Image (tube, rainbow, N blue to C red):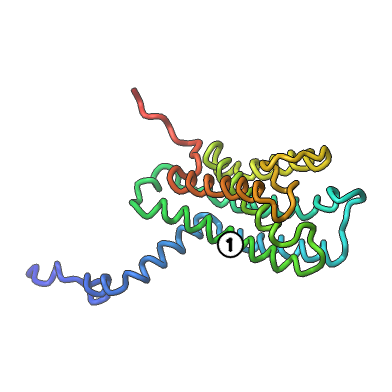
């Protein structure tokens, strides 16, 4: 018996062949990350929110009251979509995932942007069901802003609880609509083409993206380093 050929690599695992498929490895990495964040389930939920918005507009599911009351159902749906995006920042692997290399921040950013774009597309499709208060422009502004609130909440209190941010913001917004507040930080209360509301919503969304990219969602299981 000899050891000749023991270190020979199988044809399917040669470095040349592995190096020839860097794109496939990158796609697999992205897919595994999205699956670990339950992105496929999130896409299904976002599509459901789009259908719900279409049904609400088509069959005129309104709450009795003035113009503020007409925004309640669309805002609930937009806040729900933002909450779904925020929850997908939670990962099951915790601290070990932080050692996976330089790609993790880019994966966080890509997932947040892709899911936000999917939510915008689903709600824009749902808006074709009827007359949407404020129009699609206001819907996109509200969705982006509340998604930013959700991402910031995920960084502060953990991805599993990121939904608290959009829902809390929605409750405050309902009070602002009832009380006729005019601050641009309550952008759903502003007209669709209001520059101040758009800047505030865009700023919060950008801050949420930066925070989730650089810091990631807070990991409650992470222990501080011993002194």
At 7% across and 69% down in the image, what residue appears?
2
Residue 177 image-quadrant placement:
top right
Indicate the position of residue 96 as horizontal and vertical percent values.
39, 45
Indicate the position of residue 1 as horizontal and vertical percent values.
8, 70
**The furthest residue to the bottom:** 11
Indicate the position of residue 181 as horizontal and vertical percent values.
77, 38
- Could you tell me if residue 83 is visible in this image? no
- Could you tell me if residue 99 is visible in this image? yes
Which residue is the site of mark 1?
117
Residue 8 image-quadrant placement:
bottom left
**The furthest residue to the top:** 227
On the picture, is 153 further left or further right than 74?
A: left
At 53% across and 58% down in the image, what residue appears?
113
Indicate the position of residue 110 as horizontal and vertical percent values.
48, 58
Q: Tag 1: Cα neighbours inside 10 Å, few (<14), some, or many (≥20)? A: some
Foreground residue, 180 or 31?
Answer: 180
Q: Secondary structure at mark 1?
A: helix
């Amino acid at each position: 018996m000899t050891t000749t050929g023991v270190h020979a690599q199988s044809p399917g695992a040669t470095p040349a062949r592995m190096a020839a498929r860097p794109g496939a490895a990158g796609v697999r990495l992205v897919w595994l990350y999205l699956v670990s964040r339950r992105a496929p389930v999130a896409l299904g939920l976002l599509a459901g929110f789009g259908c719900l918005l279409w049904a609400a507009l088509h069959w005129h599911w309104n709450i009795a009251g003035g113009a503020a009351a007409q925004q309640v159902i669309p805002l609930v749906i937009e806040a729900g979509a933002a909450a779904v995006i925020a929850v997908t920042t939670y990962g099951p692997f915790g601290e070990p995932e932080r050692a996976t290399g330089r790609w993790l921040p880019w994966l966080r950013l890509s997932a947040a942007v892709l899911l936000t774009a999917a939510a915008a597309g689903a709600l824009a499709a749902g808006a074709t069901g009827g007359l949407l208060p404020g129009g699609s422009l206001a819907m996109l502004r509200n969705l982006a802003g509340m998604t930013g609130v959700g991402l910031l909440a995920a960084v502060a209190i953990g991805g599993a609880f990121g939904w608290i941010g959009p829902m809390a913001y929605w409750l405050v917004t309902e009070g602002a609509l009832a009380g006729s507040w005019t601050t641009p930080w309550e952008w759903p209360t502003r007209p669709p083409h209001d520059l101040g509301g758009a800047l505030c919503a865009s700023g919060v969304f950008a801050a949420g993206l930066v925070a989730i990219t650089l810091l990631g969602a807070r990991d409650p299981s992470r222990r501080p380093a011993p002194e």
